[in-house]
Amino acid sequence: MEKKTIIQLKNVSKSFGSTRVLTDMDLEIRDDEFLTLLGPSGCGKTTTLRIIAGFETPDQGEVLFDGRVINDLPPYKRNVNTVFQRYALFPNLNVYENIAFGLRLKKPSEAEVSEKVKEMLRLVDLQGFEKRDVSTLSGGQQQRVAIARALIMRPRVLLLDEPLGALDLKLRKDMQIELKNIRKKTGISVVYVTHDQEEALSMSDTVVVMHDGIIQQIGAPTDIYNEPANAYVADFIGESNILDGVMEGDLRVRLAGRSFECVDKGFAKDEPVDVVVRPEDVDVTAPENGMLTGLVTEVTFMGVHYEIIVEIGGFKWMIQTTDRVPAGSRIGIYIEPDAIHVMKKSKYSDMFGDYSSYSSEHEQLSENTEEEDK
Amino acid sequence: MKAGLLQRAAAAPHIVWSALFILAPMVFVVYYTFTDGSGSPSLENITRLNAGNYLMILVNSLCMALIATVICFLIAYPAAFIFSRMKKKAQRLAILLIMLPLWMNFLITTYSWMTILEDTGVINTLLSALRLGPVHMINTPGAVICGMVFCFLPYMILPIYSVMAGIDPKLIEAAADLGCSPAQTFAKVIWPLSLGGVISGITMVFVPSVSTFYISQKLGGGTFQLIGDTIESYFTGTAVNYHFGAALSLILMVLILISMAVMNRFGEGEGGEIR
Ligand SMILES: Nc1ncnc2c1ncn2[C@@H]1O[C@H](COP(=O)(O)OP(=O)(O)OP(=O)(O)O)[C@@H](O)[C@H]1O
Ligand SMILES: [Mg+2]
């Protein structure tokens, strides 16, 4: 059943001065949907959110709410609410008054305010904090006040800009679950901004992958992961071996000097393509049983599995396996047809190589664990 | 222990300075107020306040200072608000311009206002040329208030500006996000958060305005007396009387302290209400 569209961005573009920040964005936010904008820093996620909230107006294109153009509607007249990255709680008000802030503008009775604030405090699990000064709260608690303050307005869509970015890993995981539960309980649609791909995949109904102000792909988390639209998405979401291939016809692709059966069709014969093979989809076999054979150059123990780098015909593959294989040994690999994902060539095709720079990349990863703690 | 001693030693000049120039004068004021010419205890100076028109002068001074303070506030608040919204570079320039007059001696500024407001002064020359004047301005209460406003306006703008510049712009966005129209955002966020600056601004303008004497002398031309003039006349004039002068100062001081206490209470009350 198709859900009703609440907010729609049509062809939205935005520049600041001479810098293009968003280009031709088309996006729909539906009823009861958890939609995540995912992309690296500076790709325009916050700007998109601010356009939806009404803090920025698009240079081109339309923002529709229930089918009505709202480009010039000021934020205070929009039925959406924002949870700001640094919370932006009112420092002169206590927890109770912060939560009641928006409600009070509608001049309700004191009994009604009290009842609704209580309900919100229960929802975000902050009972007993009414009188507390917001500056005395921990980051996670402030976060929850900010969520309650927005939710009490009963918005059609709740906008969250990297709400968990400032929290430590443990708290972030707890808040992710809590946020998902709160959303389920209230049924309010959410637009969530993050640059953490794991967070995006685990929380969302729909993920929007952005890069340089352009939407690369919109889809369910499993679609994004299993069928990335281009090399950029494949590389950004999870680990992937991205190889050059050539279509030999429907359901057959040539890569690494060999013809493979695949599940993709509809490409021209002899069309050059990008081929993605996820490290966990490659099976390790004895050399004589392998579709391809290669030399193990590196082995890293990751807890549940080993991450090994295998050089096959000059290309370094990353393979995840639970079998112990020593470095320096020769192995064969086996790939199921549905583990091969064929993509059209794009401007990102040549940007991603193999895993030859793997170890340095790994160091980099552990440095900014916030970026990708996979 | 050693650090404590060192700190105390470092603080010593300040303590000596405070004792010499703040505490000692206070003690003298109180001493002179409650003694007569021969140095024996007396309430004569206090009872004498009832006689004459001292009460009138006091009320007059308070009124003038109040008017000057209100005018300062009405100019300073929007100005500070506008400054706080300008680009950082423009803000610095604006604040520099506001502070510029403070680097001049008040006496000099007051004298220049004399030449501006005089019957044959800058404004009247202009008005006459345009066949609109002359208008008598110097030696009127208006001229005195004008002088007070000009001298003390920076003391109102600066504290208000500094609290306003410190308000996180995200709070203003948050208010709009939660349904506040611009007017409501002002009433619910900007005003309460700038109140602290307003209160210190009011204090910093009202106190010197109420006790000034040179402004009223130069721009009021001695046509009427403010409490500052009266006090000064008992210390430097022909009818020198330290004891009565001290009594007047003490009364003024008490009145100022009371009004400051009321102000602060008002501020807290306001904060408490929205809390
Ligand atoms: N008000 C502004 N004036 C000028 N440039 C801006 C403004 N706001 C954003 N930008 C620029 O637009 C680009 C996109 O910014 P945006 O804040 O939307 O990125 P983001 O995806 O939210 O990044 P991050 O993950 O770092 O928050 C950036 O290059 C940024 O410098
Ligand atoms: Mg951002």
Image (cartoon, rainbow, N blue to C red):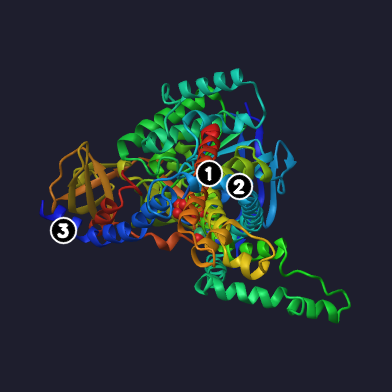
Residue B51's label in the rendered image is 2
Identify the residue at horizontal 58%, vertical 66% (top origin).
Answer: B151
As rendered, which of B182 and B186 lies closer to the eye? B186
Name the mark nearer the viewer: 3 or 1.
1
- Circles 2 and 1 in contact, beta carbons < 8 Å: yes
- Element type where label 1 sits in the image: helix
Tell me which residue sits at (56%, 47%) in the image: B49
Chain ID of residue with mark 1: B
A148 displayed left or right of A355: right
Q: CA distance from mark 3 to mark 2?
A: 54 Å
Residue, disc 3: B6
The kind of residue tagged 2 is Ala
Q: Residues within 10 Å of mark 2 (few under 14, many from 20)?
A: few
Which corner quadrant holds the C terminus of chain A?
top left
B61 over B273 or under it: above or below: below
Q: Earlier in the sequence, mark 3 or mark 2?
A: 3
The residue to which callout 1 is attached is B47
Task: Specify whether disc 3 shares its chain with disc 1.
Answer: yes
Q: CA distance from mark 3 to mark 1?
A: 49 Å
Amino acid type at circle 3 is Leu
In this view of the protein, which residue sits in the foreground, B71 or A320? B71
Q: Is residue A36 above or below residue B231?
A: above
